[in-house]
Amino acid sequence: MRERYLLRGNEAIAESAIRAGCQCYFAYPITPQGELVEHMAHNMPRLGRTFIQAESEVAAINMVYGAAAAGVRTMTSSSSPGISLKQEGISYLAGANLPAVIVNVVRGGPGLGNIAPSQCDYFQAVKGGGHGDYHMIVLGPSTVPEAGELTMLAFDLADRYRTPVMILADGLLGQMMEPVELPAPIDMASLPAKEWAATGARGREPNIILSFDLSPDNLKKMNLALQAKYAEIRKNEVRYEEAETEDADIVIVAYGSTARIAKTVVRMARAEGIRLGLFRPITLWPYPYEPLRALADRVDTVLTVEMSAGQMWEDVRLAVAERANTPFYGEMGGIVPTPKEILTEVRKHAR
Amino acid sequence: MPVDIARMTKVFGRPESLTQARSTYCPGCHHGIITRIIGQTIDELGIAERTIGIAPVGCSVFAYLWYRCDALQAAHGRASAVATGLKRARPDLVVFSYQGDGDFASIGTAESIHAANRGENITVIFVNNQIYGMTGGEMAPTTLVGQHTATTPDGRDPATTGYPIRFSELIAQLDAPVYVTRQALYDTRRIMDCTKAVKKAFQNQVEGRGYSLVEILATCPTNWHMSPIQSNQHVADTVTKVFPLGDLVNRGA
Amino acid sequence: MPRGVVVVDGERCKGCGLCIAACPQKVLASSGTLNNSGYDVVHMKNPDACVGCAFCALTCPDIALSVYREKTSA
Ligand SMILES: Cc1ncc(C[n+]2csc(CCOP(=O)(O)OP(=O)(O)O)c2C)c(N)n1
Ligand code: SF4
Ligand code: SF4
Ligand code: SF4
Ligand SMILES: [Mg+2]
């Protein structure tokens, strides 16, 4: 049975995490994801689950490491500066093959920046903000209902691949209210047992969870195993949406809140006869390179629109590989581009 | 007259909770004694099947190799936070973190204090050897005034580096911890006292009492540039003057 | 006094000498024999003096010593 609620993005993520069976949540407050922390503070203890307001983001991600090692579903959330502090911990999670969900409700940067919406943490999320050859799955929801759905998915993917998964949202999505249909809580008993977890060595050899090996040969093997896992994820988990691309001459590539705005731009452009489409990556890692490349073969222009100086733009150009023009339009500092501004940009490239 | 040990009683052997792995520590290093004490404690309490050890970064980074129990290796300084997450996820498990003085009292200061302040029901073994052993003998927050280290070549100067931090005293100021004690290993009596303290710190957790911290004054013969026996003497004569032994907090039974 | 015997695991001993200092009976000493890691392994120089108190084993960082004691009553 699905229930309908009017929720902010932050609340939809929190409530979905609870329904996905998140047993332990650890976070340090930061705007613009305060409602997420507050929702968890209110609800987790009532369900007999763990909520800790950690002493810092560093502590929070390391608590996640401990809880994940014990085999429970666990999550932390923060916004840009706090996510920077979590990077060492994320690298350890990846190295130790631990499943965890990390939410970044991105705000304007660099430094303290501001609390307005931004997409300026794309590089950090998809190229690996921490040290070492690792990736995490990065999901970019563009509506409040999708934020909820992708949160449920994030826990499944984290467990399936034993990897950290990031929800890369932004301040706009976090604060926006929309009607959301929430699924029933999952049946925790239906989840496969985690034989590898540190749950006490009863009747078996000890389970050891670590992210290091002093022998270069062994560490290479560990890395090759990680790379094999990433190849598997790339093969199975690429997700994206195409809208009005069948006859398009121009497509906008955008994710998250920007993609939502771009959908309005597509309608406006079509109304004035411009054949505009939208390509929206849902997984930012693994990035949908192949489908975007296939699309680039059919269009003249692939316009990247982002709330950053052009971070995803690099992946777009990698995908398009000179098969089409690849202009960029972006805003920074927490400014959200309006449909009109984007349409003006689109017109410049129309036939 | 040849003795037949088959007809004798074994009064001391390797604790069952320890693996057969050979230690990676230098000759005479106290980390090894502490390992044995923990193994013996796990044996005596019969908790090997539900104990999880948290290894730090430091010379004891390999601690997960020594115990026949599940184990994790934590980021430098974060073992108390990792222990918190694990214990909250599975309160039925017995969770101990094993941390050096750099790990616990420098880079991990925030995590160490706040785990104690929340009264997490965990056991923390804090090995104070007044040095960064693993990285080659640099100054630790606990390094004595005047002590020569790789980064205080002229001796620790309080004017620029402050004083040795009495971290257990800081923790003892908090309301939540149930047991905070400082122990040493420089002679048989101290080893026996320390063994009792470690057992109590585990027992507190098993009985659900809350946070226990055992600080252990340890040696690092290699980076102190002393023999193991001189090192013991140094702890007895000098280190214990700065870090007095005994219980700082002992609440409840 | 019951009699004791100390069994040294020669490959674990690192020749640190802590057990030698800890023994109240002056039983132990360096043997002059090197193990495979190059450490001078400890041995019972005065086996007859051993009382099986296990002080040596308590202090051994490498758990190289096992201690046996004569059964007091048969
Ligand atoms: C984030 C981070 N910073 C620095 C290091 C390097 N490092 C490894 S061990 C160590 C000091 C360990 O000293 P201590 O905790 O006292 O343990 P000991 O080796 O003395 O037992 C340092 C600085 C690291 N591994 N990670
Ligand atoms: S460097 Fe020091 S602390 Fe590390 S193993 Fe050697 S003696 Fe022990
Ligand atoms: S058992 Fe006691 S007497 Fe015997 S060698 Fe060891 S310390 Fe000495
Ligand atoms: S204390 Fe242990 S390692 Fe050191 S000399 Fe004695 S037996 Fe060998
Ligand atoms: Mg140290």
Image (cartoon, grey):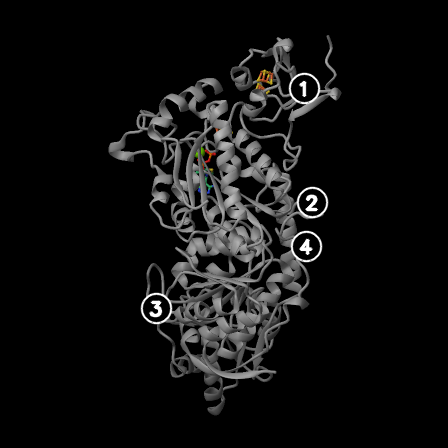
- Local secondary structure at mark 3: loop
A258 to A272, vertically: above or below: above
Q: Residues within 10 Å of mark 1 (few under 14, many from 20)?
A: few
- Residue A218 picture location, percent across and down: 64, 41
Q: What x and y, as percent, mark residue A124?
A: 46, 59
The disc, 4 or 3, on the residue closer to the chain's N-terminal end is 3
Q: Where does the image place residue A44, in percent across and percent down from the top left?
A: 49, 67
Q: Is residue B55 visible?
A: no
Task: Identify the residue position indicated by label 3 in the image.
Answer: A115
Q: Could you tell me how far apart the alpha carbons at marks 2 and 3 are, in whole angstroms?
A: 49 Å
Q: Residue flagged by tag 3: what amino acid is it?
A: Ile
Of the pair B129 and B248, the residue shown nearer to us: B248
The answer for which chain carries disc 3 is A
Which residue bears the numbered disc 4?
A: A195
Cα distance between the residues tagged 1 and 2: 39 Å
Q: Chain of mark 4?
A: A
Q: Which is more toward the observer, A327 or B179?
A: B179
| Image height of A149 relative to B34, above or below | below
Closer to the observer: label 1 or label 2?
A: 1
The residue beneath circle 1 is C72
User: Looking at the image, is mark 2 or mark 4 earlier in the sequence?
Assistant: 4
Q: What's the CA distance linking mark 3 and mark 1?
A: 78 Å
- Kindly identify the amino acid type of the residue bearing the numbered disc 1: Thr
The reply to whether callout 2 and callout 4 are in contact (CB within 8 Å) is no
Q: Are marks 4 and 3 in contact (CB under 8 Å)?
A: no
Residue C37: mark: none
Q: Assess whether mark 4 and mark 1 are in contact (beta carbons under 8 angstroms).
A: no
Q: Amino acid at mark 4?
A: Glu
Q: Residues within 10 Å of mark 4 (few under 14, many from 20)?
A: few
Mark 1 belongs to chain? C
Q: Quadrant of the N terminus of chain A?
A: bottom right
- The residue located at (64%, 9%) in the rendering is C48
